Image: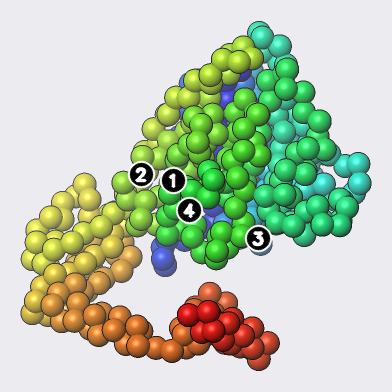
Amino acid sequence: MRFFHLSDLHIGKQLHQYSLKENQQAVLSQIVQRAADYKPDAVLICGDIFDRSVPSGDSYTIFDGFLQELSKITPKLPVLMIAGNHDNPQRLNYASSFLEKHLIYVSASAPKQPGERLKKVTLLDEYGEVDFYLLPFLKPGYVRHLFEEGVVTDYDSAIREVLRQEEIDDSRRNVLLSHQFYTNKGQSPQLCDSEQSVLTVGGLDNVDVSAIEKFDYAALGHIHGPQMIKFPYIRYCGTPLKYSVSEEHHNKCIHMVTLGEKGEEPVIDKIPLTPMQQVRRERGTLKEILERAVPENCHDFISVTLTDEKEPYRPKEQLEEVYDHILEIRIDNTRTRNIMKDQAEEELSMHPMEVFRAFYQEVQGQPMGEEEEELIQRALDEWEEER
């Protein structure tokens, strides 16, 4: 059984102020071409198909075109997909029964009623049947009502209980599609700037990887850098494109997974994807950065850090003459480092309550209310007593 593992397409996403429409269309076309070349038995898309819960018309058109091109491949290619935290379950589930007639299987929501189970798709190869379990993104509140009070208390227990009621046959080959934040005994996967904003402060959304270790392969979405979690068969495939400067050195690819007989280690091949434009950093004096501009790199998305000690004349205008996709321009010199040092020293001298207020404002986008202030003050008082 051979399948493509994809996730986090984020169709409709912008990189700073720039549209990625053409870049996304180009990389999806590459995926279709690779599917035509390698003839996988299925394509798995593990959440965050769209970047917004209400996608634009262009986003629907791009994804529809992608599915139509995949449907032209012979023999017919099943597509299995789940909703991620960016996706709107109702919108993604639209016409799902019709799509199944064309071998497109969608699971947009966690079980809602007692006795309801995950969508399971069974495919056949020369070694027998393979069961694919489609587990869309869920929060504890989505499934807490399905179990006795106190059983589901966090993300970890929610995932465990949902999977436990499936009564999965371990003698068969089982594949999981999931879009959650999996960790190994609290050890977090490597994160990028493009996904950190959706992760809960304090690790409250962590699910320990032991919850899914019995699967023969766990196809994960949610984390944008390709990597395994504890075992090679539990894997984030990452995004098909670079969605932040922190992904500059990522090698984006398709994960092609081959399952042999039960008990055999899956074989994972990485098929490179080539972007229309790179995302990268440029650091140096204005003169150095301008001199490095060549036809091969001047259209890339670039983050610029200028190190000139003396501020150059109209640096933005000069840079825009040779680079046409500038994401940001930063200054790193003695003056700015001294400013940052002064700010850090000022923050260290802040009262703990002021620090909490600033942190709350940063995370929530609004000031703390009276109830939050009282809770923090109580915790600070207890801390002072224990010192």
Picture residue at 62% right of the left edge, 25% below the top: 216
Q: Which residue is mark 4?
A: 21
- Disc nearer the start of the sequence (3/1): 3
The disc label shown at residue 225, or none: 1
Q: Position of residue 295 (x, y in %)?
A: 19, 50
Amino acid identity at mark 3: Ser
* Residue 43 position (above or below residue 200): above
- Depth check, mark 2 against mark 3: the one in front is 2
Amino acid identity at mark 4: Lys
Per the model, the C-alpha gap separating discs 4 and 1 is: 21 Å
Amino acid identity at mark 1: Gly
Asked if the residue under mark 1 is in contact with the one under mark 3, i.e. CB atoms within 8 Å, the reply is no
Q: Which residue is mark 2?
A: 250
Q: Quadrant of residue 334?
A: bottom left
Picture residue at 55% right of the left edge, 65% below the top: 201
Picture residue at 55% right of the left edge, 64% below the top: 202
User: Is the residue marked by circle 1 packed among few (<14), some (14-19), or many (20+) residues within 10 Å?
Assistant: many
| Residue 65 visible at all | no
Asked if the residue under mark 1 is in contact with the one under mark 4, i.e. CB atoms within 8 Å, the reply is no
* Residue 145 position (above or below residue 63): below
Per the model, the C-alpha gap separating discs 4 and 2 is: 20 Å
Asked if the residue under mark 3 is in contact with the one under mark 4, i.e. CB atoms within 8 Å, the reply is no
Drawn side of residue 47 relative to residue 289, left or right = right
Q: Secondary structure at mark 4?
A: helix
Amino acid identity at mark 2: His
- Depth check, mark 3 against mark 1: the one in front is 1
The disc label shown at residue 214, or none: none
| Residue in front for this viewpoint, 260 or 206 | 206
* Residue 373 position (above or below residue 245): below
Per the model, the C-alpha gap separating discs 4 and 3 is: 17 Å
